Structure formats: C-alpha cells, structure tokens
Image: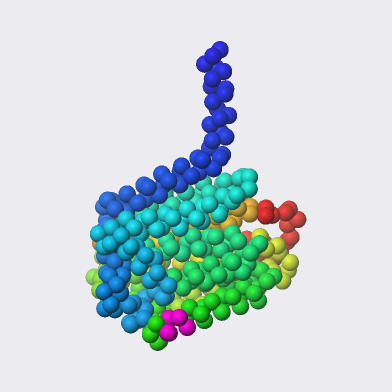
Amino acid sequence: MTDGGTEATSAPRLRRFVRGRAALWAAFIVVHLALSLLNLYAQGYPLGDVTGVYLRWAESAAQGWVRMGIDTPWVYPILAFVPMTLALAFGAAWYGQAWLLLMTVLDAVAFSILLGTARLSRTRRIAAWWWLAFLALLGPIALGRIDAVTVPFAMVGLLMAAGRPRVASVLLTVGAWVKVWPAALIAALVIASRRRREVLGIAVALSIGILIVSLFAGSGLNAFGFIEEQAGRGLQIEAPIAVAWLWQMVAGAEDVRIVYARDILTFQIDGPGADAAAALTTPVMALGVAAVVLLGIRAVRRGAAFGRVLPPLALAFLVVLMLANKVGSPQFVAWLAAPVVLGLVYRPARFAVPALLAAAVALFTQVIYPYWYGWLLVADPAFVFLLTVKVALLVALLVWAVRALWQAGTRRDAAPLPT
C-alpha cells in the first residue's frame, strides 16, 4: 500500500515539475552546456569560424590595424562586429568560451521572455520545449556562428510584434544590422501589422542612425560593403541548387568539382553552369519574395487576423531566402526557430507540421555538419542524399507556409488567439 501510494503521489509531482519553469530552465542549461562542449571538443572543428576568423578580425581592430566594415569592405553588416569584439573581453585565449557564454546569455534572455512572467501557458510551454529540442537537433552550429546572435533578437521581436510593434521594429532592425535576414521579418511585420507606418519609420530611422555613426567612424561606402561581398559569391556546396551539381559528381562527371574560395573561406561548385546558376539566384529570390509579399497583402486585405498572417508569412519569407540562396550555410537553419516559436505560441496545433519539418531539417543539418562534413566535400552519395532530403523538407515548409497564407486570406477564424 505504501509503495502504491508513493507512486500515486510522485507521478503528479513529476508531471507538475515537467510542466513548470524549473524543468524548462534545467533543460535550457543542459542543452546549452552540451552545445558548448560540442563546439569546443567535437570533431569537425565546429567553432572554427569563431576562433579562427572572428577572433582574427577582433584582434586586428583591437590592435588598431584594420576595422572590418569601416576600413575595408566586409561580408557582414557593421553591427556584427559588436559581439565579435565583446567576446574578446577575457582575452584571445578564452575567446571561444566567451563567445559561447555570450550566445547562452542572449538565448537566456529570449527564453525568459518566451516563458513570460505571468502563469506559464500551455502554448508557451510547448514552444519553449520545441525550441530546446530544435537547438539540440541542430547541434553546435546553433551557437557557433554570428547567426546565433540574431536569432534571440528575431524571436523576441516577433513575440512582441502584436503588443509592442515599436520595440519589435527596434529589435529586428538591430538584428538585421548584425546579419541581414531579420530584415525579412521586418517586411512581414510591416505587411501584417496595422501600425505598419510606425514599424517602417522606426526601422528606417534606426538604420539611418547606424549608418551615420559608421560614417563618422570613417566607414564611407564600406558600410555597404556586405552587399557587394555577398553578390560576388559563387555557388556554395550547401546551397539547395548545388544539389544538381553534387549529383553530377556522384554520377562521375569529370568537369564538376568542389573548390575552396580562400577570399570568403567557403567551398564552392566549379562546373558548367554553376556561375550562371549563382547569378540567377538573386532574381529568383526577388521573385519569390515578391510572391510572398502579394500573398501576405491578400490575406491582410481580406481581413485575416494578425496572428493568422504573421507566423506563416515570416516563415515563408525565410524559407524563400534559404531555398533561393547561393550560399546555403548550415547555420541558416537556425533562422527557422523564430517564426516556428511564434506559431507555436499562437496556435500549436496548426503549427505542428512546420515544427516537425523544421526539427527534421535541423537534424539533417547536424548529421552533415560538422561531424561528417568531409563526406559531403567528396560528394559521397549518402551525404548528397541527406542534403537532397534536407532541401525537400525546406520545400515542404514553403508549401505549408504558402498554403497557410492562402487559407488565411480565404476564410476567417473566429477563435481568439492567445495574448
């Protein structure tokens, strides 16, 4: 009787613990500690960009030699240099550890805002557990790149979009001046929000202010150097469209090979039509973005609720940027967390499919990079297949988002959204 009574008492306690904040924060610590250790010690040198590239840039500026984005054109917007400099606070020897600590702190801030200060709702609990699972599935790349800085800004910006669009605009604009992709979320917010003029005005004013400061620092046109640097890239092997050339290598094509571009430190495709395909990605991306814009405007004009439009609209924008991209770096997958978390907070049942698809994309990404990336560099059939499946999952995500946007502009849902 005692054993049975003990089990009956402990089961509800365990359920309450799992549903509470303590379990979520414990899982947050475990996941981020594991990701940090993987970045520091796992095979494949996952923290290579941080300790091998970001550190060099930060030290160069600290020594007064070259300030990236100011004294010379740079591949990133100007604010990307802020976290790279902050990570140098404990010295070059601890740069990697400081970077991981900074990323963990940024994630912790976003996580606390996601959980909120009121009673923890079911939808926010689901979104929080999903995000932790997504980070674990994505692996060390979730913390080991500059994109890790922007994800918390994007996530918090979207979470505040309904109640505090001005704050959301500031956060997303700052994120966009670290890495460009949050600009797509600003576009989604401008379309979905009734206070679009305020959102756009704040984004423009803050951007002008950032540019003025950089000009006073002596940047000149180097402040826009990231646009030219990105435009000059070739077709990177992880880019979705590069799958066609990788399969040619699998088939034994001798005129297709993988080369290392030392100027931008990436592996690219060298073969017939690769340069033309890389050049076409920009207009294709523009057409895809324009199509998503039209779908979003259609939904808003037909009276679709803000919460029905913003999550799939933001997701559609980001997946278009990922699919029609000649770079396709594995860290891009981290972007998906922001719109999926927002969708799960609003309507977890409706967003179950994209949540599962995004989690699968994260898992396939970690399998490929960083542990066995070398197999992709030699076009091993199994890993080319994994990359192909990952691209197919992204296509499925886009189809879902487009369908959700179309439905949002076709019928109205009277059920209230969580605040």
At 53% from the left edge and 60% from the top edge, which residue is drawn? 155
The answer to whether 2 is drawn above or below residue 259 in the figure is: above
Task: Say left or right for 342 vs 367.
Answer: right
As rendered, which of 202 and 38 lies closer to the eye? 202
Q: How many marks?
A: 0
As rendered, which of 344 and 356 lies closer to the eye? 344
At 36% from the left edge and 67% from the top edge, which residue is drawn? 84
Report if residue 214 lies within the magenta region.
yes
The answer to whether 400 is drawn above or below residue 12 in the figure is: below
For this orientation, the residue located farthest to the bottom is 220
At 27% from the left edge and 56% from the top edge, which residue is drawn? 44
The answer to whether 182 is drawn above or below residue 38 in the figure is: below
Report if residue 328 lies within the magenta region.
no
As rendered, which of 137 and 290 lies closer to the eye? 137
The answer to whether 406 is drawn above or below residue 273 in the figure is: above
Task: Say left or right for 207 vs 149.
Answer: right
Q: Is residue 395 visible?
A: no
Q: How is the image coloured?
A: rainbow
Stretch in magenta? 212-216
* Corner quadrant of residue 354: bottom right
As rendered, which of 307 and 72 lies closer to the eye? 72
Q: Position of residue 254 (x, y in %)?
A: 24, 70
